[in-house]
Amino acid sequence: MSVDAVQALTFDVFGTVVDWRGSVARELAARFGPRGQQRDWPALADRWRALYQPAMEAVRSGRRPWVRLDDLHRENLEQMLAESDLGGLDEAALEHLNRAWHRLDPWPDVVAGLARLKRRYILATLSNGNVALMVNLARHGGLPWDAILGAEVAQAYKPLPAAYLRTADYLGLAPSACMMVAAHNGDLVAAGALGFRTAFVARPQEHGPTQTSDRSAAHAFDIVARDFGDLADQLGC
Amino acid sequence: MSVDAVQALTFDVFGTVVDWRGSVARELAARFGPRGQQRDWPALADRWRALYQPAMEAVRSGRRPWVRLDDLHRENLEQMLAESDLGGLDEAALEHLNRAWHRLDPWPDVVAGLARLKRRYILATLSNGNVALMVNLARHGGLPWDAILGAEVAQAYKPLPAAYLRTADYLGLAPSACMMVAAHNGDLVAAGALGFRTAFVARPQEHGPTQTSDRSAAHAFDIVARDFGDLADQLGC
């Protein structure tokens, strides 16, 4: 089986490892609820997140020089709050709220699954999140990464090829010795086209109970798993 | 005290965290001893290591484009073996021997000390070793780094300022929120000149029993410690 040559697992993080929607909605509620401001917090988490791809596209296309995700998140936060008529936060409160993305909770199967996978494989992030964000997420959730790689150290946002290829190169591995783990078909298609092995882990609640996209694997990936425990089972860990 | 603002400890690795000389000498002895070839293995470890700074200097000066340390180590290994009339290794054996640098043992106080320090501080490597080397060292020795940073992701070998400044920037921190931990006066002087806090940890046996350099702190560093346990004590961890 081609996955026998895999030495490293590279992980998408937002949605695949951590529940950004539930975590961000909780932080928004905790920030504004006590001030008597009520909104549909999961919908505002969705709106904040919806500004993510367009913001990265400006960097991917070259219209903007490199901007780390923390700074894109901050711009998007200010836009989302203005659209929602939510204001009155001082700089410290805005910055704390922006760092909600540093405090996202892992899905319940993640920590135990990663511990099993780490026995056999190098575990690295291959996320569009910046290094500081990923470090803080790992410390918050107890994620035992061997290395924080991906967009910032590659200076390229996924799905640009350089994000994947530079990550494999930092690991000193051919793409075929790396397996991309993600809950998103597009991420795996991009990685697979470059020679990565691919593992789809279903996260059908990432976007809430009415999610329509990425509910299941839409391509012939090397592995399709229900969660990280199932991934560890299938990899014999 | 100025160290109250420190959020991350950034570590020199070769000599400070791991005993490269003892580990490399053992690997050389294990490789050549059974073939009936006897040499002064610690002296050959020293010779291999002595080629390290000149090799990096060719990159630092711009005479060569970026070359990762694994590749410099390999060039230096071949030179050292030729000088020592040690030959007959095939490609796989040479590559395995070169990766002795991925299997260096930590000093005895390191793992327990890092576990204490990690409770309060972000722990990152700021080494001239490349990412794959650092990842493998960490897995070999059980080193709980939060991030592998330093020369390769900065694309600059210490003591060039970019190696330190880009590492702090990846962590999203000002240099003054980072403390460089090293057994080498020159490394700490370079970091301190850029605003890093500094901790000298004595490793008076790094170069063997007759070591003359870096036996003690030669400057007014923020902390001078006997080992990583003492460093944790002094930082209140």
Image (cartoon, coloured by chain):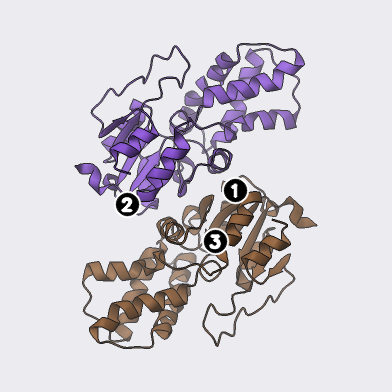
Chain colours: A brown, B purple
Foreground: A149 or B33? B33
Q: Point out the tag, 3 or 1, that comes first from the N-terminus.
A: 3
In the displayed structure, does residue A18 sit left or right of residue A228? left
Q: Quadrant of residue B175?
A: top left
Answer yes or no: are tags 3 and 2 on the same subunit. Answer: no
Residue depth check, mark 3 versus mark 2: number of the one nearer the observer: 3
| In the rendered image, the vertical position of residue A39 relative to residue A7, given as above or below | below
Q: Residue at x 30, y 36 (%)?
A: B198
Residue B211, given in percent of the width and then of the height, sits at 42, 15
Query: Can residue B75 be seen in this snapshot?
Result: yes
Q: Residues within 10 Å of mark 3 (few under 14, many from 20)?
A: some
Residue A195, given in percent of the width and then of the height, sits at 70, 58
- As helix, strand or loop, the secondary structure at mark 1 comes to helix
Query: Circle 1 is placed at which residue position?
Result: A169
Q: Residue at x 70, y 54 (%)?
A: A176
| In the rendered image, the vertical position of residue B132 relative to residue B211, given as above or below | below
Foreground: B73 or B121? B121
| In the rendered image, the vertical position of residue B24 relative to residue A99, given as above or below | above
Query: Circle 2 is placed at which residue position?
Result: B173
Identify residue type, mark 1: Asp
Identify residue type, mark 3: Val
- As helix, strand or loop, the secondary structure at mark 2 comes to loop
Alpha-carbon span between mark 3 and mark 1: 26 Å
Residue depth check, mark 1 versus mark 2: number of the one nearer the observer: 2
Q: Chain ID for label 2?
A: B
Answer yes or no: are tags 1 and 2 on the same subunit. Answer: no
Alpha-carbon span between mark 3 and mark 2: 27 Å
Q: Chain ID for label 1?
A: A
Could you say which disc has been placed on residue A214 in the image? none
